[in-house]
Image (cartoon, helix red, strand yellow):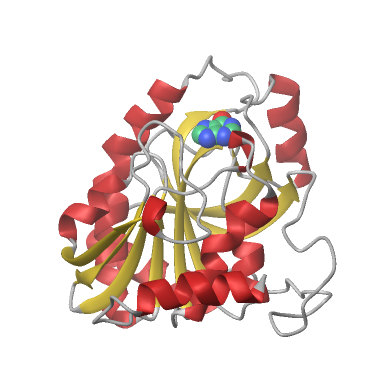
């Protein structure tokens, strides 16, 4: 795998003039962040050797290098989901490549269903920790010690320093910021009322179908992680409503600008 990672990284390095230390993954409906990016170079996933190609509506599928608020960043516009049928290794391959081109800090965003009864649709939640309910793990299988540890420790998967900074920044911007535990599921079904209830009893505040594999590999490769969820629907006992992908995208698009402002303001301080 290291040879493949190096091949993909070299392909990018050969055409880059900037080498950002921060990577940002845009989740459902949060493509608006790209509008605030002074684009220097956009490279479609389809051109990058060994990269999977994204299939979901609303996910663009390219690496966009540029400057945002005086900070060099690379934005992953479009991610790979386990529910699309990719293996965990495919879902997380791009993060190995990001590490290889010099990324040290990763910002992840996603849409999630809220299970904490104090949450409302449109809220932003900073992820404090996660529970992996995907039934799989990207680090399963033989370990290449050149990449990371056989038994990855996960005591601070999400940087406490960044969570604190997020709260300070949100306060200054007058953005109401929730904090909680993200439960990662495979999908593609949304949860039954019993599942939402069970995940909440387990300690989850929001549930979604991404982020967990990416965080695991980012930690494995020594990157710091910061992640935000936009709450697009509620799976709160008594208020579980029928939810569709369209509604999730709509809610994410509406709350998007809030999340964009928060990330934008945080960038120069990271
Ligand atoms: N469940 C799982 N994934 C999701 C949800 C949800 O309710 N909302 C957005 N992504």
Q: Is residue 268 left or right of residue 139?
A: left
| Displayed-image quarter of ligand 1 | top right
Residue occupying image coordinates x 31% and y 41%: 255
Q: Is residue 76 above or below residue 198?
A: below
Q: Residue furthest top?
A: 242
Q: Is residue 202 above or below residue 158?
A: above
Residue 29, picture quadrant? top left
Residue 193: % across, % down: 69, 21
Residue 257: % across, % down: 24, 47
- Total marks drawn? 0
Residue 47: % across, % down: 37, 56
Q: Is residue 16 left or right of residue 98?
A: left
Q: Is residue 55 above or below residue 99?
A: above
Q: 247 or 57, which is in the foreground?
A: 57
Q: Is residue 222 left or right of residue 36?
A: right
Residue occupying image coordinates x 32% and y 62%: 170
Q: Is residue 242 above or below residue 140?
A: above
Residue 113, picture quadrant? top right
Asked whether residue 224 is in view, the answer is: no
Residue occupying image coordinates x 58% and y 20%: 240
Pick the quarter of the image with the N terminus.
Answer: bottom right
Residue occupying image coordinates x 24% and y 82%: 17
Pick the quarter of the image with the C terminus.
Answer: bottom left
Residue 214: % across, % down: 59, 59
Asked whether residue 140 is in view, the answer is: yes
Q: 210 or 101, which is in the foreground?
A: 101
Residue 262, picture quadrant? bottom left
């Amino acid at each position: 795998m290291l040879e493949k990672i190096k091949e993909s990284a070299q392909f990018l390095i050969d055409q880059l003039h900037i080498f950002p230390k921060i990577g940002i993954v845009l989740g459902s409906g949060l493509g608006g962040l790209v509008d605030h990016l002074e684009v220097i170079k956009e490279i479609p996933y389809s051109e990058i050797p060994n990269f999977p190609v994204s299939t979901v509506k609303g996910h663009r599928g390219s690496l966009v290098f540029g400057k945002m608020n005086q900070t060099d960043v690379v934005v992953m516009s479009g991610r790979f989901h386990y529910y699309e049928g990719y293996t965990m290794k495919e879902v997380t391959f791009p993060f190995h490549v990001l590490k290889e081109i010099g990324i040290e800090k990763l910002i992840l965003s996603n849409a999630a269903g809220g299970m904490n009864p104090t949450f409302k649709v449109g809220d932003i939640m900073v992820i404090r920790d996660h529970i992996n309910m995907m039934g799989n793990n990207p680090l399963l299988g033989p370990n290449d010690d050149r990449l990371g540890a056989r038994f990855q420790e996960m005591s601070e998967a999400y940087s406490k320093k960044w969570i604190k900074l997020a709260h300070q920044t949100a306060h200054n911007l007058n953005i109401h910021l929730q904090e909680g535990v993200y439960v990662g599921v495979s999908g593609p079904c949304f949860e039954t009322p019993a599942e939402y209830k069970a995940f909440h009893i387990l300690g989850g505040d929001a549930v979604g179908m991404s982020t967990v594999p990416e965080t695991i590999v980012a930690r494995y490769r020594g990157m710091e992680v910061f992640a935000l969820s936009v709450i697009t629907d509620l799976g709160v006992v008594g208020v579980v409503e029928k939810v569709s992908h369209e509604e999730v995208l709509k809610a994410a698009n509406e709350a998007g600008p809030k999340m964009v402002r928060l990330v934008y303001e945080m960038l120069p301080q990271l």
